[in-house]
Amino acid sequence: MLTDLYQLTMGAVYHEQGKDDTATFDLFIRKLPKDWGYFIANGIEDAIDYLTTLKFEEDDIEYLRGQGFKESYLESLRSFRFEGEAYAVKEGTPIFANEPIMRITAKRTQAQLVETALLNMINYQTMIASKASRVVEAARGAKIADFGLRRAQEEDAAMKGSRACYLAGVGATSNVKAGKEYGIPITGTQAHSLVMSFPTELEAFRAYADTFPQGGVLLIDTYDTVKGARNAAKVGKELEAKGGKLGGVRLDSGELLSLSKKVRQVLDEQGLDYVKILASNDLNEYSIEELLDRGAPIDGFGVGTEMITAKPVAAIPGVYKLVEDEAGPKIKLSPGKRSLPGKKQVFRQADDQGVYTHDIIATEGEEVEGTPLLELAVKDGERARQKPTLQETRRYCLEEVAKIPKRFRQVKAPNGYKVELTEKLEEKIKELTRAYRDE
């Protein structure tokens, strides 16, 4: 039932007309946002789980009866299952515009119905993983923590967003439930309210250090950041004397470049060179890059709103289009929205050092050099490949991103990774274009 109404109305038409031939649809993203050099395909495993468990409950059918659907169609939904096949890239694979992420082949009623749910799962999770990958790349090895729970669009987005961030290389999350369910390391400090709850900042820091004597992080900007650093240093030395160890201090406001340098000086003067400086405060890949370019001695960044929402990218244009049925390959010719006809495969090319150079989209069955990206994921409605762990997917993602040329991993990346079409596919496009325009 997680679908748009028109999937069901189209299904009703196909059912009544006896039009349930085999059809193939491609799920792909039309274009990259400004400055983005690549996407990270995500939500694939959720999509596979959805395809292999899809069914209608009796209360679903009763609800649809009240929406005016005919009994014969409602009866067909009682036994509805996805019985087709799905080819998909591995979760965590870098992808580019107009490349098939998932290819569905099934009876038309089945292949049509799943469109909305697949797009819902893959569009959001791909967007957040891609944004998080950009933040990780901008940090140049500095640790990134996901602080986005409170700014996410409700629980589903917070949970899937935290997972997407971790998959793309973010090291930890403040989201405790995501830590519990997905095994993501959790991290956190304290809020300004804790500091303000004690008579003085120093007393607040001592109270926190008493409770967390090993690796605690103190928030030092409630009143005066440099004075806060001095208080934190005092507590750090007290912890040393008792066998404890201060982990870090966090800056959450002000001019982070100059403040981080002053705080580093305060800590180092007290022999606390091991204490890390962490920063938050509406950060994104652009501000992180600028801070590091200007020599900010910041060891880690907590990124919230802009990573969990992919700000300023509100959504990515992932679509699901019919590319073939029993009448042959299909093409959409709408200006700016052309689709690529027929079943296809994507082949990734690399140079002698293993750096990716370009991709080639070919018609199914063509012999093309390179690594094929689309793999059989569902066959006859059943999962056809083992579900990887999140840790396995994360490792794979980081390895694959490292193979993308550096210019496409920059914060202001060119939108120009080469994706070629084979001559055979180009000819099929020309043939269908002529055919439809001559009708």
Image: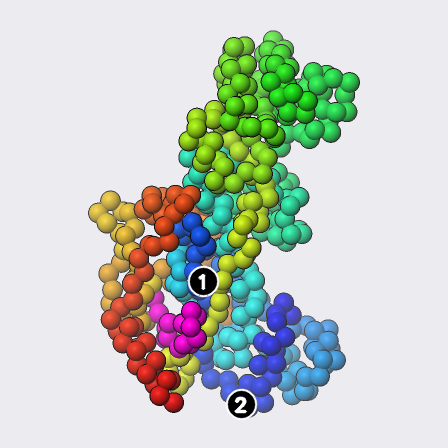
Residue 283: x, y in percent? Answer: 55, 38
Going from the N terminus, do you reach mark 1 or mark 2 first?
2
Q: As displayed, is residue 105 above or below residue 219?
A: below
Whether the magenta-drawn stretch holds residue 332 is answered as yes
- Mark 1 lies on residue: 29
> As rendered, which of 167 and 55 lies closer to the eye?
167
- Mark 2 lies on residue: 18
Q: Identify the mark at residue 419; answer none if there is no mark.
A: none
> As rendered, which of 167 and 260 lies closer to the eye?
260
The amino acid on which the numbered mark 1 sits, given as a three-letter code, is Ile
Residue 411: x, y in percent? Answer: 42, 43
Name the residue rendered at 51%, 31% in the picture: 300
- Work out which quarter of the rendered image holds the C terminus and state it: bottom left
The amino acid on which the numbered mark 2 sits, given as a three-letter code, is Gly
**Which segment did they paint magenta?**
331-345
- Compared across the picture, whether 287 is left or right of 244 comes to left
Residue 354: x, y in percent? Answer: 27, 47
Q: Residue furthest left?
A: 352
Name the residue rendered at 45%, 81% in the picture: 22
Label 2: element kind:
loop
